[in-house]
Amino acid sequence: MTVDIGSPAVRGQILRAGDPGYEDARALFNGMIDRRPAMLVRVSDAADVAEALRFAREHGLEVSVRGGGHGVAGRALGGDLVIDLSALRAVTVDPDSRTAVVQGGATWGEVDHATQAHGLAVPGGRITHTGVAGLTLGGGEGWLSVKHGLACDNLLAVELVTADGRILRVDDDIEPELMWALRGGGGNFGVVVSFTFRLHPVGPMVYGGMIGYRVSDAQAVLELLDRLYAQGSEDFGAAAVSMHAPPAPFVPADLVGQHILAVVPTWFGDVEAGAQALAPLREEVEPLIDGVGPLPYVALQAMLDPGQPPGLRNRWGAGFAEKLTPELIAAAQEPLPGQLAHLIILPLPEAVRRLPELPGAFPSRMGGRWLVHPVATWADPAEDEQNRAWVARMNAAVKSTGTYLNVEAPDDDRVRWAMGETRYRRLQKVKATWDPDDVFRHCAHISPGDGS
Ligand SMILES: Cc1cc2nc3c(=O)[nH]c(=O)nc-3n(C[C@H](O)[C@H](O)[C@H](O)COP(=O)(O)OP(=O)(O)OC[C@H]3O[C@@H](n4cnc5c(N)ncnc54)[C@H](O)[C@@H]3O)c2cc1C
């Protein structure tokens, strides 16, 4: 028999098993996550969040927080009571101050749509349906990072509901240590109801797209990318992707579904200069596929969407490599475990590697030159093992000294390792100050501590 514990007094919607909408509300991007929380509270404002936290405390319920629902670990649904921000998606742009206030359940497609109406943008995810919240709190690396760093480097302030239900504005003047932790320390410190970002003039037309090569040319292509990066232009970015050629208009029919090494180059300066700067990609190694040219920034941001449909099974990995080792080249050539699986090899730009203007807890800038990111996505549970094994093999090929926690399902030890001891202990002190009872534990978790 279930005991009726009542409901929090919120203005938003409460969903329990059996309610219409409950099944949709508990669906996450990663279709492997099948959790049935007792209650989802679809909050309508900061006061609802505070009330949901009070109710959870009163009834001893574990809490988790859902932004865009794209964390592959599925921690958004880890609690008995889920604080679901998906109804809070407004994006308000102030073109004069070049800032945007983005609510905690918004997606990157919504941010790009609103900011590009003013010719502005902030670095964000490469798939439009990814949530702003989890991505930013854990770092946030996107195409625009070559020029403007991580999403968290552009975070100026948040409206935060703390574990004890206080509603605060946090910025570098008010609670600077907490602000430091929010730039990369994940969902450990409270519920972010809105983010204030600094924006930058971008586009609306940029230069880029997708160009594809034979996998046997992997070494030549990756070395070429390395050389192009070494030229040091902040307008140039690129990712190499070992993948199956997509059914895109620029892909010849006989190549669709074939294993290729794609490069997604981007150029954020003058479009004609972009054509010149990217010419070596056409001239130095013979491409099989060429879909590079001028395109709107929002089209670039949506370009990879068809390859990442929500609801499939996902296992991802990440690591940093300092050099293009033979193992890494071989990894880029290894057959993929399924049609949608892909291996991203991304030279990390200086704008990401150097210390940002606004200090933050994000650790991975201390990693190597290349971010290596295996993404296994498949439909059939019978293929779980082959996909897991491939991700493990790709991770092993990197011999990494760090990881990008946002794309993993890290346990506490892995979080500590990725953060490094000094940063981890500093984060523990912030956690002990703002969440001493560890209410926000369903995340890339930092346990409260005194810093010793
Ligand atoms: C298709 C896809 C593409 C991606 N592309 C990129 C990319 O280009 N660059 C990149 O850097 N990363 C990328 N990622 C990884 C991404 O950064 C993480 O998956 C991130 O967690 C997504 O945030 P979310 O709000 O959608 O996730 P959720 O699953 O909703 O949240 C993840 C965690 O964040 C915390 N959280 C969420 N909302 C809040 C909130 N409002 N307040 C406090 N804590 C909160 C919680 O701890 C939660 O468990 C991608 C992921 C996917 C699935």
Image (cartoon, rainbow, N blue to C red):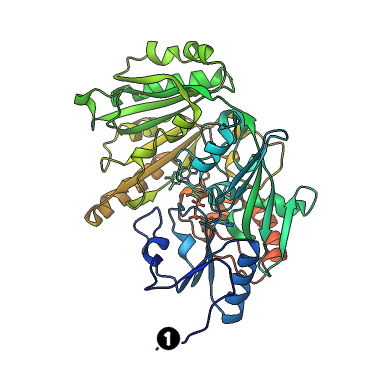
Residue at image position (64%, 72%) is 437
Taking 168 as reference, is 341 above or below it? above
Residue 251 in view of the camera: yes
Residue 451 in view of the camera: no
| Residue found at the very far left of the displayed protein | 254
Name which quarter of the figure residue 115 lies in.
Answer: top right
Q: Residue 441: horizontal and vertical position, in percent? A: 56, 65
Residue at image position (51%, 11%) is 272
Query: Which of the pair 381/112 is nearer the observer?
Result: 112
Instruction: Answer with left or right where residue 344 lies relative to residue 178.
Output: left
Query: Which of the pair 262/274 is nearer the observer?
Result: 274
Query: Which of the pair 438/425 is nearer the observer?
Result: 438
Residue at image position (31%, 46%) is 390
Name which quarter of the figure residue 299 lies in.
Answer: top left
| Residue found at the very far bottom of the displayed protein | 1
Disc 1 marks which residue? 2
Q: Residue 133: horizontal and vertical position, in percent? A: 56, 51
Taking 219 as reference, is 130 above or below it? below
Q: Residue 104: horizontal and vertical position, in percent? A: 58, 53
Q: Residue 68: horizontal and vertical position, in percent? A: 49, 52
Amino acid type shown at disc 1: Thr
How many residues crowd mark 1 within 10 Å: few (<14), some (14–19), many (20+)? few
Residue at image position (36%, 27%) is 262
Check disc 1 and report its element: helix, strand or loop: loop
| Residue found at the very far right of the displayed protein | 173
The quadrant of the picture occupied by the C terminus is: bottom right
Taking 191 as reference, is 98 above or below it? above
